[in-house]
Image (tube, grey):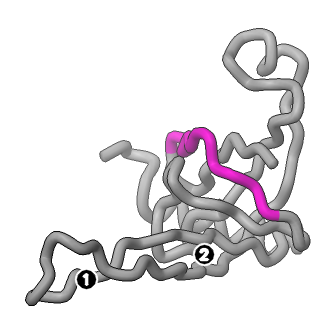
């Protein structure tokens, strides 16, 4: 655990929300359902669960694109960590301003106040 985590992360997250920078963003997660005990070899029906919090869509700089594997159409979605009950992962989707994106990569900042999500349509 970083010395920056905890209280500092909450201060940063609260400051972003108070400044009206982020807006409602939803992480969409598909989870596998429970299988029927009488037929355990058949997987259960998957369910979609939505987690709403705050975030905003940003773009990558030319330097960021050149220094990594970020594709031309990829965008950065910044999520305010303390507004979500889960950490996003590459199996998730994110809905921001009515557009659904696939999560490619997730990078927390050192304080874990935000998650920078590499996303693709």
- Closer-to-camera residue (90/5): 90
Residue at the far top in the pictured view: 66
Prevailing secondary structure of the magenta residues = strand
- Closer-to-camera residue (89/30): 30
Classify mark 2: helix, strand or loop.
helix
Q: Nearer the viewer, mark 2 or mark 1?
A: 1
Region rendered in magenta: 100-110
Check if residue 106 falls in the magenta segment.
yes
Which residue is labeled 2 in the image? 83
- Closer-to-camera residue (60/113): 60
Which residue is labeled 1 in the image? 34
**Rendered image: mark on residue 118:** none
Q: Position of residue 104 (x, y in %)?
A: 62, 41
Q: Position of residue 64 (x, y in %)?
A: 78, 20
Residue 45 higher or lower than 43, as above or below: below
Q: Residue at x 46, y 69 (%)?
A: 86
State if disc 1 and disc 2 touch (CB < 8 Å). Answer: no
- Closer-to-camera residue (54/73): 73
Q: Position of residue 41 (x, y in %)?
A: 16, 70
Q: Is residue 16 left or right of residue 44?
A: right
Q: Residue at x 80, y 19 (%)?
A: 65
Q: CA distance from mark 2 to mark 1?
A: 28 Å
């Amino acid at each position: 655990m970083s010395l920056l985590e905890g209280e500092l992360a909450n201060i940063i997250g609260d400051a972003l929300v108070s400044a009206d920078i982020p807006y409602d963003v939803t992480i969409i997660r598909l989870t596998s359902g429970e299988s029927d005990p009488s037929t355990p070899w058949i997987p259960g029906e998957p369910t979609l669960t939505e987690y709403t919090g705050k975030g905003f869509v940003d773009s990558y700089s030319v330097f960021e694109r050149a220094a990594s594997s970020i594709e031309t159409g990829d965008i950065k979605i910044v999520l305010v960590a303390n507004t979500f009950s889960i950490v996003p992962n590459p199996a998730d989707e994110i809905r921001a301003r009515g557009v659904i994106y696939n999560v490619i990569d997730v990078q927390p900042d050192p304080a874990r106040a935000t998650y920078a999500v590499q996303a693709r349509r």
